[in-house]
């Protein structure tokens, strides 16, 4: 990890509990992690999830690392120990991401899920939502951006609350926790061509989550 915890402090975002660490992963660290991700994605192919009930496909592709993976089912969202496409267990969370959690997560238990979202077309985006399917809501969500810059939006605790947006670039880490853990947030758009990190272009977002409460 390129920075020492003793001198690490987030940039003010205007939201209590949301901390931004710009460029926390430097270029070599990003490239090393991307190589590991691309090797994993060759075996564990990303899939396009569908909305519960309507069955409408999302504009992104997705997969997971960890003991548990976040999945979209016809009856709603849930965590599963197996991939719904091939029924295999998810691959292990890469050590670099576990180190990132230790560095900025400040939680006494490791993450159990790393959700991987691939914004691989200019139309890829993520509507306002909140991460609320975890029992361990006292644990933060640690989000790492790789590849093209995105316009990220944060709102309030109801979908219609006022919101504001800011940009997340490759190597940026965002921590959502504390009093802002259940704020609505989403991705308005991806600025394609703003990075050359991801082969073929696009953005990869990795979100580390603790799902169950530690004993």
Image (cartoon, rainbow, N blue to C red):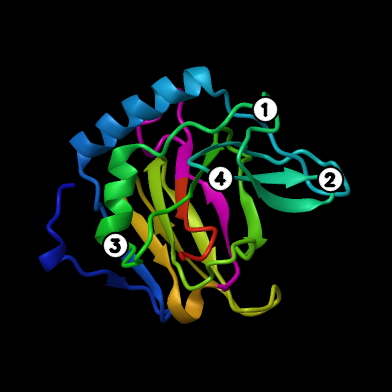
Q: Do the residues labelled 2 and 1 touch (CB within 8 Å)?
A: no
Q: In this view, does 68 lie above or below 129?
A: above
Per the image, the residue denoted by label 2 is: 74
Q: Residue at x 34, y 66 (%)?
A: 108
Mark toward the start of the polypeptide (4 vs 1): 4
Q: Earlier in the sequence, mark 3 or mark 4?
A: 4
Q: Where is residue 146 in the image (x, y as percent from the top left)?
A: 38, 41
- Residue sitting at 49 percent across and 18 percent down? 42
Q: Which of marks 3 and 4 is in front?
A: 4
| Quarter of the figure with residue 20 | bottom left
Q: Mark 4 points at which residue?
A: 68
Q: Does the magenta stretch include residue 101?
A: no
Q: Nearer the viewer, residue 140 or 10?
A: 140
Q: Distance between the residues labelled 3 and 4?
A: 21 Å
Of mark 3 and mark 2, the one earlier in the sequence is 2
User: Which region of the structure is painted magenta?
Assistant: 182-205
Extreme front residue here?
Answer: 215
Residue, disc 1: 87
In the rendered image, residue 187 lying in the magenta stretch gets the answer: yes
Q: Is mark 3 on a helix, strand or loop?
A: helix
Q: Is residue 142 left or right of residue 61?
A: left
**In this rendering, position of residue 30 left or right of residue 81:** left
Is 51 on the left-hand or right-hand side of 24? right
Callouts 1 and 3 close, C-beta under 8 Å: no
CA gap, disc 2 to disc 1? 17 Å
Picture coordinates of residue 119, whole percent (x, y): 55, 38
Residue 12 horizontal side relative to residue 163, left or right: left
Q: How far apart are marks 4 and 1 (CA)?
A: 13 Å
- Does label 1 or label 3 sit earlier along the sequence? 1
């Amino acid at each position: 990890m390129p920075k020492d915890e003793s001198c690490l402090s987030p940039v003010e975002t205007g939201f209590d509990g949301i901390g931004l660490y710009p460029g926390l992963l430097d270029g070599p660290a990003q490239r090393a992690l991307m190589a590991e991700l691309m090797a994993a994605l060759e075996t564990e192919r990303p899939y396009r999830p569908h909305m519960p009930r309507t069955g409408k496909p999302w504009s992104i592709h997705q997969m997971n690392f960890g003991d548990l993976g976040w999945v979209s089912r016809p009856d709603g969202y849930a965590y599963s120990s197996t991939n719904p496409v091939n029924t295999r267990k998810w691959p292990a969370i890469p050590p670099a991401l576990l180190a990132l959690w230790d560095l900025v997560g400040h939680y006494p238990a490791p993450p159990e899920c790393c959700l991987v979202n691939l914004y691989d077309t200019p139309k890829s985006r993520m509507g306002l939502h909140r991460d609320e399917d975890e029992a361990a809501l006292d644990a933060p969500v640690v989000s790492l951006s790789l590849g093209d810059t995105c316009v990220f939006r944060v709102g309030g605790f109801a979908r219609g609350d006022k919101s504001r947006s800011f940009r997340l670039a490759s190597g940026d880490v965002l921590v959502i926790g504390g009093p802002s853990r259940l704020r609505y947030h989403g991705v308005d758009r991806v600025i394609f061509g703003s990075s050359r990190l991801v082969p073929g272009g696009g953005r990869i977002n990795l979100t580390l989550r603790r799902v169950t409460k530690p004993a």
